[in-house]
């Protein structure tokens, strides 16, 4: 069922929720818990119980897993025979250029008390996962869905130097993210970005940038460039920081 390898026993109500989700996958991945509850005519508490059956601590974690599952399902219908893209990227992670970029990001993030993850579209899925991953390993992290209408758009000067934003963008040219970066930089927040190219606007505005350089892929009008490098990089940063913290204890 969905993203799990083993069957899950569901009661009649939970089965209705499950059937609705599978029939409206592209819609549900962007729904709030209240929206989903209203659509299937149950309480938010029922939705939370449903999520726990899929070994999720809450709706937010369930939605992240659901989004990742949806992306995998889309890719399953596309010819992905050329695996050299992934192999080449993984080889580059062992080179000094990538390692130096990673360490620059680690140095900035080590001193942060709050990390804001920002991404749009498929990058937003990775950003939400990154926030959960960082929070689990070493510090509080939040996913910002709408940068320009978020309370962290205007910050107290007493807080801003303890906050770092991680911007995830394949193209590195999203206008909303660029405006958010400009706003946070005026408040002395640090910016780390993960982009496909170091020449993009978001990369050049960042205090540290990790660029992965893989082939851009389009399917009809959708940009389906792999998010594997961004995912790998986020986990590598968090694990390195956790390792450094443990070694200093």
Image: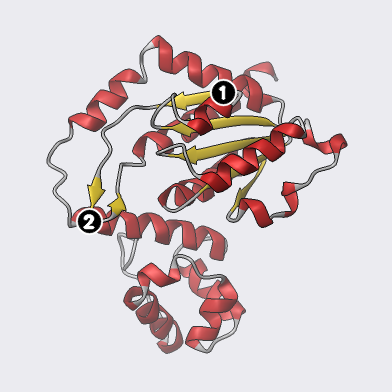
| Relative height, residue 57 to residue 108 (above, below) | below
Earlier-in-chain disc, 1 versus 2:
1
| Relative height, residue 104 to residue 186 (above, below) | above
**Residue at coordinates 25% horizontally, 47% vertically from top-left?**
218
**Residue at coordinates 56% horizontally, 23% vertically from top-left?**
208
Q: Which residue is mark 1?
A: 208
Q: Which residue is mark 2?
A: 220
Dot 1: what SS?
strand
Residue 132 is at least partly visible in this image:
no
Q: Position of residue 224 (x, y in %)?
A: 29, 48
Q: Quadrant of the C terminus?
A: top right
Residue 214 is at least partly visible in this image:
yes
**Residue at coordinates 33% horizontally, 27% vertically from top-left?**
213
Dot 2: what SS?
loop
Relative depth, front residue between 213 and 229 = 213
Q: Position of residue 165 (x, y in %)?
A: 63, 37
Relative depth, front residue between 173 and 80 = 173
Residue at the far top in the pictured view: 96
| Relative height, residue 59 to residue 125 (above, below) | below
> Badge 2 local density, few (<14 within 10 Å), some, or many (20+)?
few
Q: Nearer the viewer, mark 1 or mark 2?
A: 2
Relative placement, left or right, of 158 versus 92 is: right
Total residue callouts: 2
* Picture disc at residue 224: none
Picture quadrant where residue 190 is located:
top right
Picture quadrant where residue 200 is located:
top left
């Amino acid at each position: 069922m969905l993203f799990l390898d083993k069957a899950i026993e569901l009661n009649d109500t939970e089965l209705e929720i499950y059937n609705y989700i599978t029939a409206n996958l592209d819609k549900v991945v962007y729904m709030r818990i209240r929206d989903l509850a209203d659509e299937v005519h149950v309480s938010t508490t029922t939705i939370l119980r449903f999520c726990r059956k899929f070994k999720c601590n809450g709706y937010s974690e369930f939605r992240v897993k659901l989004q990742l599952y949806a992306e995998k399902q889309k890719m399953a219908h596309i010819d992905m025979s050329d695996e050299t893209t992934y192999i080449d990227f993984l080889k580059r992670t062992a080179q000094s250029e990538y390692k130096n970029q990673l360490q620059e990001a680690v140095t900035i993030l080590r001193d942060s008390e709050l990390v804001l993850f920002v991404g749009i579209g498929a990058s937003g899925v990775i950003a939400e996962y990154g926030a959960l991953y960082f929070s689990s390993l070493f510090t509080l992290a939040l996913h910002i869905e709408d940068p320009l209408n978020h309370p962290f758009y205007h910050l107290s000067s007493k807080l801003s130097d303890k906050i770092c934003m991680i911007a995830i963008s394949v193209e590195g040219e999203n206008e909303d993210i660029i405006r958010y970066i400009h706003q946070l930089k005026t408040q002395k927040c640090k910016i780390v970005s993960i982009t496909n190219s170091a020449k993009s606007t978001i990369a050049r505005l960042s205090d540290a940038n990790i660029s992965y350089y893989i082939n851009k892929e389009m399917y009809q009008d959708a940009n389906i460039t792999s998010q594997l490098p961004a995912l790998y990089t986020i986990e590598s940063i968090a694990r390195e920081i956790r390792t450094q913290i443990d070694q200093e204890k």
